[in-house]
Amino acid sequence: MCWKRPQRHASVDSSLGSGLTDIQGPVLQGDAVTPGELLTEAHQVLLKIIKHYQEEGQGSEVVQGVLLGLVVEDRLEITNCFPFPQHTEDDADFDEVQYQMEMMRSLRHVNIDHLHVGWYQSTYYGSFVSRALLDSQFSYQHAIEESVVLIYDPIKTAQGSLSLKAYRLTPKLMEICKEKDFTPEGLKKANIGFEHMFEEVPILIKNSHLINALMWDLEDKSTVADKHELLNLSSSNHLEKSLQLLMDRVDDMSQDIVKYNTYSRNQSKQQQQKHQYVQRRQQENTQRQSRGEPPLPEEDTSKMFKPPQPPPRMDTLLIAGQINNYCQNVKEFTSQNLGKLFMAEALQGHN
Amino acid sequence: MTPIAGAQQRRSISPPPQKKPKTTSMQLRVNRGRAQHRAWRYTCQPKTAARRHSLSLSKMSVYGPVVKIHPVVLASICDSYERRNEGASRVIGTLLGTIDKHSIEVTNCFSVPHNESEDEVAVDMEFAKNMYDLHKRVSPTEVIIGWYATGFDITEHSVLIHEYYSREATNPIHLTMDTALQSGKMSIRAYVSAQMGVPGKTVGVMFTPLTVKYVYYDTERIGVDLLQRTRVLPNRTKGLTSDLSQVGGSAARVQDMLTTMLAYIDDVLSGKVAADNSVGRFLMDLVNKVPTISAEDFENMLNSNINDLLMVTYLSNLTQAQIALNEKLVLL
C-alpha cells in the first residue's frame, strides 16, 4: 500500500512573518477602532475553552490560549481557538513562539482562520486585573487594534450561568502604556480613572444551521436531566472567598495610599524647606549688603534638596480596577441570591 | 450460510461459504488490474439490506467498549466539514482521547487534509503527526484513539485509512457523522474493525458498531445549554444575559416544567390518561422535598440570609465609593 502525498504539502507556505503583516493590513485600512460587537462561533470556541480549563487548570493558575478569527466590518468574529501549554519547562519562551507558529501554519492547511485576533484566559473569582494581563493585552492591541481578551470564569459558570466577558483596553490607556509614563503627573494629564481602563465588548453567539441540527440531535439523545445549578441556594462559600479576596486587595490599596501620602507629605515638607532656605538666603544677603559684604552666591536649591521619587501610580490603578471588579461581581451575586431567597420564601407559602 | 446478524455479533472468522453467497448481505470486492505496484485491496461493504439490519442491531447489545463523546468533538467535526475544500465530499481527522477498561472517551479532535478520488486516497501523515505532537504538549494525557469521517457510509477508502490509523493506535475506533443529514438525522456512529473471511484466502475487514454515549463536564453542560437556547431564535444569535435575568430565565423554565406536570396530573385525575405508579412516586418525592420548617425558623433563616447579602452589598458599594473618592483626591 503506498500513499501519495498531496501536492500542496510539498512547499511550506510563506513564513508567518508575512502572515502577520496580512493581519495588520485589513484592520488599519478601516476607520479607527470602534468598540464593535463580538461574534463567536460558539460551538467551537466556547466548548474548547471550557474543555481546556476543565482538563488542565484544576485549581492551579490560569489557563491561556489564542483566539483566531476575522475582522468583519465593525465586528470581530472569533471562529476558533487553541490552547497554550502550561509553563512547566524552563525554555517556555522559545517553545511558545514556535508552538504558535506551528499551530497556525497547520490550521491554515485545513482552512481554519489563522488570524490572531486575541487571547483568552481563565480567572479565579474574577481576579484578572494584573500587570501581566495589561502588558499582554497591550502588546496584542498594539499589533492588532481590534484584539480582545476573553475572560472565562469557570467557578461562576459552574454555578449555573456561563461567564464569559470580552475586554479591550481603552485608547487612553493605550496611550499611557505606550509612553510608559506612570507618574502621578502623567496620569493626571491623561485624566484616567480606574473605570476607564477596560471597556467591555458585548458578545453575541451565532450558530450555523448544521450546528443547530447537531443541537437538536444532542437534545434528543442526551438523557441527563437539565441541571438547575443556577437555582442553588447555598452561597456562603462563594461569598466568603470573594470577600476575602476583596479584603486582600483593599489592604494592598491602603498600603499604596499610605505610600502615596508619605510621598506627598515629603514633597510638601521639602517645598517648605526650600522656601525657608531661600528666604534665609535672602535675609542673609540683605544683611550682608547692609554690612557691605559681597552677597553669597545663589545656590542651586534643586541640587541641595533632591525631590522625592513619585511612586508609580499604575499599580494603584490596577488595584482600584480589581477592587471595582470584585465589587461588581459581589453585587451581581447578591442580587441573584436575593431573588432566589424570595422565591424560596414563596415556595414555603408564607408571606 | 451464516446470517448477517450472527456474523456481526461474533468477532470470530466465519466458516468458509460453500459457494458465492447469493444473498446481498455481503459482497467481497477485489480490485482488478491496477498498476503493478499497488497491492490487492479487499473491502467489505454491507449493502442496503444489511444496513437495515445494522440499524436494528444498534438496539441490541454490542460487544466492545462504550464510546463516550464530548460535544466539543462533534462541534469541531461540524466546523471542519463546513470549511472543507472545494470538491471534497467528506472530511476526515484524528480523534484524541483516553482509553479506559470498558470505555473510550473522546475528548478532542483535529482535521487532517486528505485527497480522495475514485481509486486512491491520500492522507497527509506528516500533518497528522505534527498536529498530534502539538496537541500532546498541551494535554499530555490524550492519545490517538481513532479517526472520524463525515458521511453516512463506510467506503473502501475508509478501510485503508483505518489501517493507517491502526498503526498509530491499538484497535482504533472509527466515528462517522452524517453531516449531509441523509436520514433526516445526524447519525453519529462508532465502529471498530474486525477481521473476517477465510484465513489465507479471501480476507476482509468488517466494521462492528459500538454504543455511543454523550458525556459532559458540568461546565460543558451549561455551555451546551446556552448553545441550545440559540437554536430556537430565527437569526441564530444570542447575547449572554446577566445576573437577575438569568435567575428569571431559569425560574421560567422550572415553571414550564411544572405546568406540564400539572397538565399531566389533571389528565390522570379526570381519567384521560392511565395512572402510572412510578410517576406518582416521583411526584410524591418531589412534594416531600420542600422541607417543612416552622414559620418562625424559616423567617429567621430568611432574614439572616437577606441581612448578610444586604450587608455585603452595602460594603461593596462603600468600597467602590471609597476608591472613586481616592481617585479624585489624587488627581486634585
Image (cartoon, coloured by chain):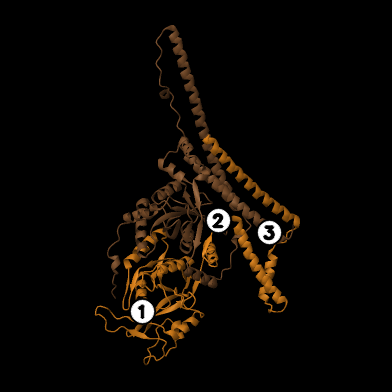
Figure check: A49 above or below B66: above
Q: Residue at x 53, y 73 (%)?
A: A221
Identify the amino acid type marked 1: Glu
Q: Foreground: A86 or A82?
A: A82
Q: Foreground: A51 or B82?
A: B82
Identify the amino acid type marked 2: Lys
Figure check: A55 above or below B332: below
**Chain appearing in orange on the rendered image:** B
Q: Which residue is mark 3?
A: A344
Residue A69 image offset from top left, x and y in percent: 42, 59
Q: Which residue is mark 2?
A: A156
Within 10 angstroms of label 2, few (less than 14), some, or many (20 or more) residues?
many
On the same chain, marks 3 and 1? The answer is no
- The numbered mark, 2 or 3, whose residue comes first in the sequence reads 2
Q: Which mark is residue B143?
A: none
Judge from the rendering whether residue A62 lies leftward or rightward of residue A23; answer left or right: right
Q: Foreground: A348 or A248?
A: A348
For label 2, the SS is: helix
Residue A91 image offset from top left, x and y in percent: 36, 51
Identify the amino acid type marked 3: Ala
Check whether the beta carbons of the residues at disc 3 and disc 1 lie within 8 A of each other: no
Q: Which residue is mark 1?
A: B156
Within 10 angstroms of label 3, few (less than 14), some, or many (20 or more) residues?
some
Q: Quadrant of residue B2?
A: bottom left
Q: Quadrant of the N terminus of chain A?
A: bottom left
Dot 1 falls on which chain?
B
Check whether the beta carbons of the residues at disc 1 and disc 2 lie within 8 A of each other: no
**Chain appearing in brown on the rendered image:** A
Q: Is residue A305 visible?
A: yes
On the same chain, marks 2 and 3? The answer is yes
Q: Quadrant of residue A73?
A: bottom left
